Amino acid sequence: MPVMRYREALNQALREEMEADDSVFLMGEDIGVFNGAFKVTAGLLEEFGERRVRDTPISENTIVGMGVGAAMTGLRPVVELMTINFSLLAMDQVVNHAAAIHYMFGGQAKVPLVVRMPQGAGHQLGPTHSHCFEAFYLHVPGLLVAVPSTPADAKGLLKAAIRDDNPVVFIEHETLYGQRGEVPENGGPMRFGEAAIRREGNDVTMVGISRMAITAEKAAETLADQHEIESEVIDPRTLRPLDLDTILDSVKKTNRAVIVEEGWPHGGVGANLAALIQEQAFDWLDAPVQRVTGADVPMPYSKPLEQAAFPHEEHVVKAALATFRDL
Amino acid sequence: MATKDAATGKESSDGPVGGAGHSLPDEATCRLVLEKMMLIRRFEERAGEMYAKAKIGGFLHLCIGEEATVVGATQALRETDYLMSTYREHGQALARGTDPNAVMAELFGRVDGCSGGRGGSMHLFDAERRFLGGYGIVGGSLPLSAGVALAADYRETEDVILSMMGDGATNQGTFGETMNLAALWKLPVVFLIINNQFGMGTALHRHSAVTDLSLKSEGFGVPGTRCDGMDVLDVHSVVTGALATARDERQPQLVEAVTYRYRGHSMADPEEYRTKEEVEEWRGRDPINTFSTRLVEEGVLKQEEVDEFDAKAIARVDEATTFADHSPFPDLDSLYDDVYVYSGDVPGWWTVDERSPEVHPGEKERDAGPVPHELAEQGAAYASVGDAEARRRGSSPKEGEGEPAADDRDEEGGGD
């Protein structure tokens, strides 16, 4: 299987979908001449021309809104926003328009739009460029939300997102763009709503969101090597639809659950999953559901503070051990 | 055209009042235009009455006074052109040809409404007629309309979109952003500002530093013109020209129609921000009276025919009201329909229904079991429109049977 970087896998998905369907086009800030802030769209302007790869002004709300309008009338726009923080300027178009239109017009219009954006800390970009907001978008009925953590998922899910008839918030991770991984040759779209079990185990279920799926996997190795604890690591891959059944099945097997995310704790993905797990698997739980989240602060710039503000392997190991402390 | 600037009180000197500056179109068009304006007027009056009777909920924004703008502008469109509007859009749907039954049923929240009862007064839609919606967010539809224009351009069609907004929308960030992108990408779009002098209760000169709104797009590369929004022929003429330029020269245009709404912003508006005299002054330029008087004076129509049109409009509105009243409410099991375009083979939970202790995916509401259904019925009972059987039959309880009076409802708290 070919090995490629996460950004290359995304680039390949865009290229393949654009080759296959003329209604697919790209819009975003500096995606063309500049080749993209994170080089995901590198080479596509040259290949497809300005009709299909459109550099936009810095007008997030309007470029997303134009994507919605173009999608309503039959195109399949893929809008890139430079970071997830900037997507907040487009919140009106995403929530009040993209997510609501199919429903509020009684099913007469659909919005096959993809809004791609990276999130995450680690590059010292400070309090306006480093957050993880998947919980904001997970909150909204009408949106699909993807949080791929591997190059293979990035490609397969982006292809699926482009072909889907719903608006998709496609959340990439800044620190993953350079990560390498195997990507199936001629791989097609992946199904939304299907979690990946990254590692099987019987002792504790660990659900990792976005980059934290990788952090959870590393923690699982440590738990196995040093504590003889076999973790089952689940990467939901998409938060809407959510493969809740795979998570519940695992919890019913392990009787313990740890949810790892990089975003803020209040109203986070972990809060949501913990609620769903305790509602539906309470009788199977041997310990309270543990959450590991980012610190409840705006992301600081200073390197040690920044690194201290989001979860690492050690945090996850501690949380997993805590689910055993009463035994 | 003569447009009185509400802020300055000055007459602009572009032409005479009342359509006298334009020769009349052919007789059939004159009749059609008058009939449409009269239908809208009577429809809106009836909607107001139905709101007072609590047949209609939420907010109700009427376009009485703005009929010339609505009809003049939409008559300039081809059938294949697109239209987007604000939340004051009953007239736009009717002018575009949407069945008045479907519009009234939507206001009533019924299943036969043009948005299936999901949107209500502010969110009418008619895909077949390319009426792409009323929108409740001020300025929210501007980017959408540019996107529609982009798609039309991308596919090399001749379609144009007429994108309507109120005067208040020109202060939103999307106004400047959209003008810039439309001009930058040479999109086939005509923006129409329906300047009815107020952003909710805030007068034009109190909400916009520049009160000639046709100037506000020019710095972004979208030329603006003004027309007399009380004169259906002037609106039609100016919008027709703008559409041609957008279509043929790929140069987006902006038109400001200077008009007035006679009624409050919405039904519960106490109208403390303007004088009765001001309203009366504008009523003196009533677009329907002005046009019908001219048609009679110039011998196109007899007064009796005008009266017949009015009777016909009233009868049509009667029919729509009866239809709406007998249309069933949407089935409670349809609550989760159309949240997504569901494709059968995608697994996972799309939505989570937590209304009952029996948590289930919302899209499986139909199979959720007796407890969720019982709770849904109990919730729906708060609507005070009869039991499940009555809702399905579409019969309504007699007046005074548990319906909230319209007076109990608040005007938008700090809203638009």
Image: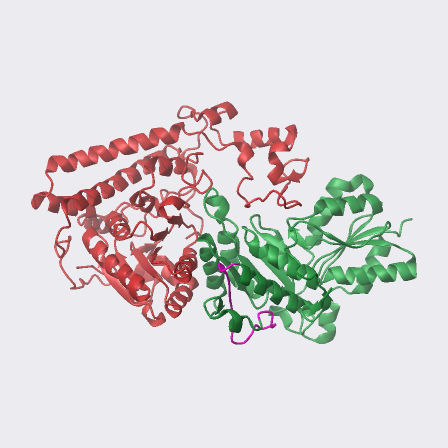
Up/down of B301 relative to B175, above or below: above
Q: Is residue B234 left or right of residue A32?
A: left
Residue appearing at x 19%, y 50% in the figure: B281
**Which chain is assigned red?**
B
Residue B225 in percent (x, y) is at 25, 64
**What main secondary structure does the magenta stretch of the protein show?**
loop
Q: Is residue A34 visible?
A: yes
Q: Is residue A22 magenta?
A: yes
Residue A303 in percent (x, y) is at 72, 75
How many circles with numbers are drawn on the protein? 0
Q: Is residue A147 visible?
A: no
Up/down of A169 relative to B327, above or below: below
Q: Quadrant of the N terminus of chain B?
A: bottom left
Q: Is residue A296 magenta?
A: no
Residue A327 in percent (x, y) is at 91, 48
- Which residue range is magenta in the image? A21-41
Tint of chain A: green
Q: Nearer the viewer, residue B103 or B216?
A: B103
Q: Is residue A307 left or right of residue B274?
A: right
Place residue B97 in its image quadrant: top left
Up/down of A279 relative to B169, above or below: above
Residue appearing at x 53%, y 35% in the figure: B334
